[in-house]
Image (cartoon, helix red, strand yellow):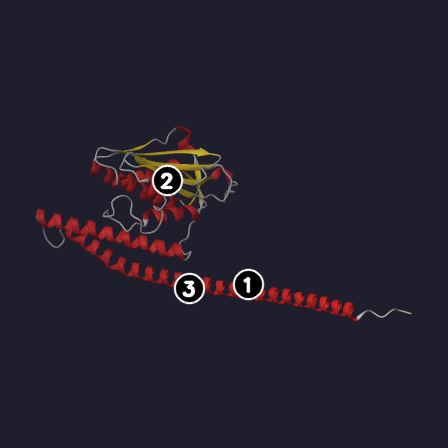
Amino acid sequence: MTEPIPSARRTRRLSSSRAQGFAKLTRDLTAAHAVEAALKAAKEATETGRKVVAENRAKGAFLAAMSHELRTPLQAIIAYADLLDMEIAGPLNETQRTQLGRIRVSSKHLLGLASEVLDLSRLDVGGLPVRPGAHGLGPTAEEALLLVAPQADAKGLTLTSAISGSAAELCYWGDEGRVRQILVNLLANAVKFTPSGGRVTVSAGATQQAPPDAQLGALGPWVYIRVEDNGEGIPADQLGTIFEPYEQLGNASAEGAGLGLAISQRLARLMGGDLTATSVAGVGSSFFLWLENSATRPATPPG
């Protein structure tokens, strides 16, 4: 015959069982609340993300439309200035020709700014296409140098190419037009911030491993193009922000909207490369355009 459990012991067992049940219920409720909070946070994050994407698209569409509306009349002004310069409507005196030249220069400057805004807005929404392929590094650099040579000559700068030998034979994988656009921007900046009598040099090379500050998603080998100047340089506390949109290099009163470097770096990364810089204030700057070596790509079959 089983002995009866004393009342005090039975009470303690019931109390312990109830405590265990309460603790389990508390844990379950806590877990449920945690799951609910996580789901709510995820939902809010998703909604916020969608809102940000929608806002960026709306901003991009507005900037693109505004840029287009600016480009059309500016192109017309430039065209009419060219017609006047041809003296189709009659001869011009020297004063008129000088003023016409200022109109042309200012219009082309504004047209360049509008084009930069358009490029940036298209990059923000992923609407700027790149057409990568294998291209010679030397010829692309030479074309960019030719485009900037008049600006360098006007300031009395020495613009030279140190791309020779094996470096001239290197090929990169990227969009030739976009690479040229990046190089022209880098060269124009170097000319702008280098005093008269200075020098701007373009060189190139190849490496298996890029420096740690280059954000490259694949393994090497890589090719690089360096644009080096002995201009005013960039202070160390500003070097980390030069690739941000609307950041001005050097003197804040310099011409431009501060978009060239931001666009150039985004274009480089869109092609799987990167754009980096080193600089010493009062000594000069070096910008490096990193691109994938086309030797890593399989040969394209003929036809």
In the visual, does 51 lie left or right of 83? Answer: right
Residue at the extreme top: 165
Question: Of helix, strand and loop, which one carries label 2?
Answer: strand
Q: Where is residue 254 in the image (x, y as percent from the top left)?
A: 24, 46
In the visual, does 275 lie left or right of 199? Answer: right
Dividing the picture into quadrants, the one containing residue 284 is top left
Location of mark 2 (residue)? 277
Q: Nearer the viewer, residue 99 or 275?
A: 275
Q: Where is residue 296 in the image (x, y as percent from the top left)?
A: 51, 39
Location of mark 3 (residue)? 54
The tag earlier along the polypeptide, 3 or 2, is 3
Q: Nearer the viewer, residue 213 or 262?
A: 213
- Which amino acid type is shown beneath numbered disc 2? Ala
Q: Where is residue 67 in the image (x, y as percent from the top left)?
A: 30, 58
- Which amino acid type is shown beneath numbered disc 1? Ala
Question: Of helix, strand and loop, which one carries label 1?
Answer: helix
Give the residue displayed 14% in from the left and 51% down from the top: 100
Location of mark 1 (residue)? 38
Tell me, for residue 159, which label it has, or none: none
Can residue 267 be seen in the rendering of this structure?
yes
The tag earlier along the polypeptide, 1 or 3, is 1
The tag earlier along the polypeptide, 1 or 2, is 1
Give the Cα separation between the discs numbered 1 and 2. Answer: 42 Å
Q: Nearer the viewer, mark 1 or mark 3?
A: 1
Q: Which of 290 and 1 is in front in this view?
A: 1
- Which amino acid type is shown beneath numbered disc 3? Ala
CB atoms at circles 1 and 2 under 8 Å apart? Answer: no
Give the Cα separation between the discs numbered 3 and 2. Answer: 33 Å
